Image: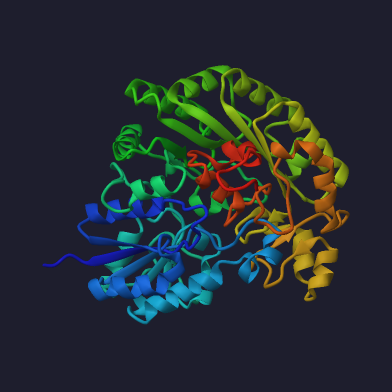
Amino acid sequence: MASTKVTLVNANLVQRPAVAPIALDIIATSLDYQGFDVSILDLTPRALDFEKAIGEFFARNNPDYVGISFRNSWDMYLPSIEALSEQGSFIPSHRRIIDALATRFPREKIIAGGVGFSFMPEVMLERLDLNQGVVGAGEMILPEIINKMEARASLDDIPFAVQKGRQGYKNGRMSAFPGTINRKNFVDNDRYYTFGEHVGIRTNNGCTKSCIFCPEKTVKGSLFRHDLGNVLEEMDQLVELGVKDIHLNDSEMNMPFGFSKQFAKAIIERKYPLDIRFWSYMQPKPFDDEYARLWRKAGMIGIDFGTDHTDAQMLKKLGKGWYGPEDIAKTTKICNENGIAVMHELLFGMYGETMDSIKKSIDFIWSLNPHVIGTTLGVGVTPKSLLAINQRVLTAIAENDIGARARQGLYCKGTPLEDPTYIVDPSISIPEAYDQMKAHIGEREARIMIPTLDSISAPNNQLVNSKRIDNVRENELKGAHWYHFPRQFEKTRTERL
């Protein structure tokens, strides 16, 4: 009996940066293990002619089912609603991809997924005119959905399977594929590293924290980990492909702390080539000197800390009360002493924010001498976050007029919580606040990213289609984009940005 044929589609049309779709490697490995015949249609390299790419693919292939992964549905920066097409929403381009697929393949056999789908699955099914999808880590769920569809059976009992016209889905425990992920035979990771800056890998999925603005815990689950032996074998494959810069894609690499130390020790024992470099996301706490020494020995070059603020009260409002300014200072000092570059990302605009608190937070982080500081003004409000049920947010959303919503500190040019939605405390005037931040940062702009109204300029914290990506590629630099931020003020081969 012939195997059921499944095509996995990467729907990400953003080429700057070009992000290797690790989800497709993971899901393809799981499907292949369970006997499905898997093919990949990666639209990122063909973003400018994706309709033609779809036509060419289906002229050669005849799958039984299509699984499509949406990495993002919004751009998470407030200026994007003015600067980017579709007010920073990716849903219209997602719909164009689905419509192009549907001219060559039955719409009812398309299954949606990915983080960009999972934080508002019911909305996405409606707006994309699809019948079913999977929320969260789909590697163990998608095969079950396809088998049920093949048998014309109900999907109601499958955890995290969402269906058009139905609110919610059956909950359960997310679990990882139990073996080693194949990083050679599905996604062209070698190409992504050659064209881009790094390739990602993950050891954990999900998060135990409840930051008020983040849907991660709801979308990815509380936390589940992968077998370290399998992760190391996966890393071996990337190293054999020539990937020398590996981004550790865990939600927060230092959580759980003991497991992360164990992973660093395992990498050291692996004795990878000395030019292998690691980059990661972390929180300022937990962190200690032993941890920094282990990771530096393992090859950690830089850590992007989702610090968000330095004021203790603002941190509590953001749902990040487990650390304070003294922890931020201690962790930065440890990294500096161990030769690990630090980026602190600051997120401004939560209710209670003032221009004074913004300036004080920037100055405090600057005093710690990090490698780079990222600043963002405007807190994104996503449907699966705690902020989405904040009473002030709900009151502002109830206003039908865009101007009336803005006066209450909520900015959205479409449908709130469906289209890009942000809050900035009403005491802060937009767009004047951008000029005030720029003036305050002043000559420190070589190491502090400044929010800009155009959303794509090189000094901005924003990445989507930004000039900073062009600068990194022009100089043939690898690794995390923020690490090279100060170099954008140097002369490139063609011009000074």
Q: Name the residue: 41% across, 22% down.
A: 265
Count the marks: how many?
A: 0
- The answer to whether residue 247 shows anywhere in this view is yes
In the image, residue 353 sits, relative to residue 325, either above or below, namely: below
Residue extending farthest to the front is: 494
Q: How is the image coloured?
A: rainbow
Left or right: where 495 falls relative to 424: left
Q: From this viewpoint, is residue 418 visible?
A: no
Q: Position of residue 473 (x, y in %)?
A: 50, 46
Looking at the picture, tell me which residue is in the foreground, 87 or 484: 484
Relative placement, left or right, of 466 versus 195 is right
In the picture shown, does residue 355 fall above or below 129?
Answer: above
Task: Give the residue drawn at x 62%, y 29%.
Answer: 285
Task: Specify whether 469 is left or right of 284.
Answer: left
| The quarter of the displayed image where residue 155 is located | bottom left
Q: Position of residue 5 (x, y in %)?
A: 23, 66
Question: Of all residues shown, which one is farthest toward the left?
Answer: 1
Report x, y in % for residue 196: 45, 47
Q: Residue at x 86, y 57 (%)?
A: 429
Front residue of 134 and 413: 413
Task: Tell me which corner region of the image, top left, top right, bottom left or bottom right, holds residue 357.
Answer: top right
Q: Quadrant of the N terminus?
A: bottom left
